[in-house]
Image (cartoon, rainbow, N blue to C red):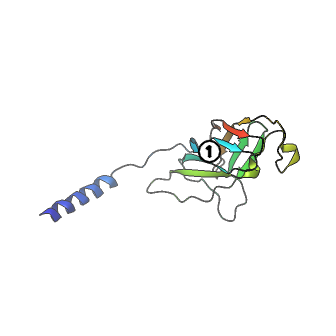
């Protein structure tokens, strides 16, 4: 008897879930900040990771293996420096065309330079250099050229004097 009830519950769940309509996302990608691995980093020493979530209604986010285009842009607003990234091709999900997920951006130690050190790359420690607040802006572009609204991230503290 228990097997029949369990089987009926599974069938009802499958029928009910097949009737659920997929979410409707706009054709322009949308991004939301999830978090940083670290909110404080040391110049030229620490790696940091930025995690964002995305949705794209027409499901055309990401580049094919043969593409050489960049489709995610991270801007250091202190310096106006743009770090281009390439999101790999993302398969459509389920019945609808919309896709959603998370992206992790890895900032290497060489990406974490204080403004006074940028002139002398790789980053060099300077005596009595003040710490800086770094604010990043993120945008993504899908294959149709639809651009997300710019996403301003919370500030990260950058220690400029190396230990």
Which picture quadrant has residue 4?
Answer: bottom left
User: Residue 141 at x, y = what percent?
Assistant: 65, 48
Which picture quadrant has residue 13?
Answer: bottom left
The residue at which mark 1 appears reads as: 38
User: Residue at left 75%, top 49%?
Assistant: 111
Which picture quadrant has residue 131?
Answer: top right
User: Residue 3 at x, y = what percent?
Assistant: 17, 65
User: Residue 152 at x, y = what percent?
Assistant: 64, 36
Left or right of 146 in this view: 78: right
User: Residue at left 46%, top 53%?
Assistant: 96
Of 102 and 25, nearer the camera is 102
Residue found at the far front of this picture:
163
User: Residue at left 63%, top 36%?
Assistant: 154
Left or right of 141 in this view: 117: right
Q: Is residue 88 above or below residue 162?
A: below
Of 35 and 146, nearer the camera is 35
User: Residue at left 65%, top 58%?
Assistant: 63
User: Residue 23 at x, y = what percent?
Assistant: 44, 46
* Number of callouts: 1
Residue found at the far right of this picture:
120
Left or right of 14 in this view: 134: right
The N terminus sits in image quarter: bottom left
Secondary structure at numbered mark 1: loop
Circle 1 crowding by C-alpha within 10 Å: few under 14, some 14–19, many from 20:
few
Q: Is residue 64 above or below residue 20?
A: below
């Amino acid at each position: 008897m228990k097997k029949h009830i369990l089987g009926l519950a599974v069938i009802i769940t499958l029928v009910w879930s097949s009737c659920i309509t997929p979410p409707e996302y706009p054709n322009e990608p949308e991004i939301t900040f999830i978090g940083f691995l670290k909110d404080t980093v040391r110049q030229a020493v620490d790696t940091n990771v930025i995690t964002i979530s995305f949705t794209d209604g027409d499901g055309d986010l990401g580049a094919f293996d043969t593409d050489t285009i960049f489709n995610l842009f991270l801007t250091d607003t202190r310096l106006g420096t743009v770090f281009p990234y390439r999101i790999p091709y993302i398969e459509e999900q389920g019945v609808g065309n919309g896709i959603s997920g998370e992206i992790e951006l890895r900032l290497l130690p060489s990406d974490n330079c204080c403004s006074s050190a940028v002139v002398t790359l790789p980053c060099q420690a300077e005596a009595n250099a003040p710490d800086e607040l770094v604010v990043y802006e993120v945008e993504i572009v899908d294959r149709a050229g639809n651009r997300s609204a710019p996403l301003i991230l919370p500030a990260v503290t950058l220690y400029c004097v190396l230990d």
